[in-house]
Image (cartoon, rainbow, N blue to C red):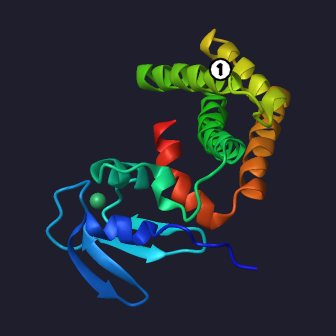
Amino acid sequence: MSAVINRDPAGLVLDRLEGVRKSGAGWTAKCPAHEDRSPSLSIREGERGAVLHCFAGCPTQAVVDALGLRMSDLFNEPLSLPQRRQRATKAVLKGVCTEALIVVCAASPVGPRNDADTSRLKTAVARLRAALSLDGLQGRREIERVAAFASRILAGELLNDEDRDNLTDNAEWISWLVTDETKPGVAARLEGVTNNA
Ligand SMILES: [Zn+2]
């Protein structure tokens, strides 16, 4: 059963772009989020709405901002509040996954190598703790453990093998939550949201 399309998100986007050309099943246009000489932006109609991709690497959120639109404008149907919350939660979880990986790297036998590493690790702890303030976030216990390990590393403690295994297990569990719960198409569209999180 296909969803009832009550809006035209691709049309909304195309109206605001320059240099629009039909290309295959979709269109190309100049990306509004960077100084674009060749048409780097691809626009197509996906299952749930407009799918944007800048080949120069602009996050979808940046493209949407440059167009004066919101991420929600890309969807065929307006999302309900619980749906929006769920998507935001998953996007945050994806960000958490990256931060957990940074902690795993910092836990290597040599520890953080320089000031930049230490400063990045501090950011990771701050982001992990910020994520924990979000209601309904999955993997809360694992995130807390990863953050606790990061704090110990920052305190100058060198983790032993067992600690490192434990940390890696928790980080893997978080990444499993992300891959299992997020469909690839949705993940691509949420990329912008994640970058902002
Ligand atoms: Zn771009």
Q: Is residue 55 visible?
A: no
Q: Which residue is at the far bottom?
A: 24
Q: Secondary structure at mark 1?
A: helix
From the viewer's perspective, is 46 left or right of 21? Answer: right
Provide residue 124's location: percent of width, then percent of height: 57, 26
44 or 148, nearer to the observer: 44
Q: Which residue is mark 1?
A: 129
87 or 177, nearer to the observer: 87
**Residue that appears at 63% across and 9% down:** 155
Q: Classify mark 1: residues with Cα within 10 Å, few (<14), some (14-19) or many (20+).
A: some
Looking at the image, residue 161 lies above or below residue 158: below
From the viewer's perspective, is 95 left or right of 178? Answer: left
Which amino acid, mark 1?
Answer: Arg
* Label 1 lies in ligand 1 vicinity (Cβ under 8 Å): no
From the viewer's perspective, is 142 left or right of 175? Answer: right
**Residue that appears at 58% across and 55% down:** 78
**Residue that appears at 60% across and 14% down:** 154
Provide residue 123's location: percent of width, then percent of height: 51, 23
Q: Which residue is at the far front?
A: 6
Quarter for ligand 1? bottom left
Q: How many marks?
A: 1
Looking at the image, residue 36 lies above or below residue 173: below
Provide residue 74's location: percent of width, then percent of height: 48, 60
Rendered image quadrant of residue 111: top right
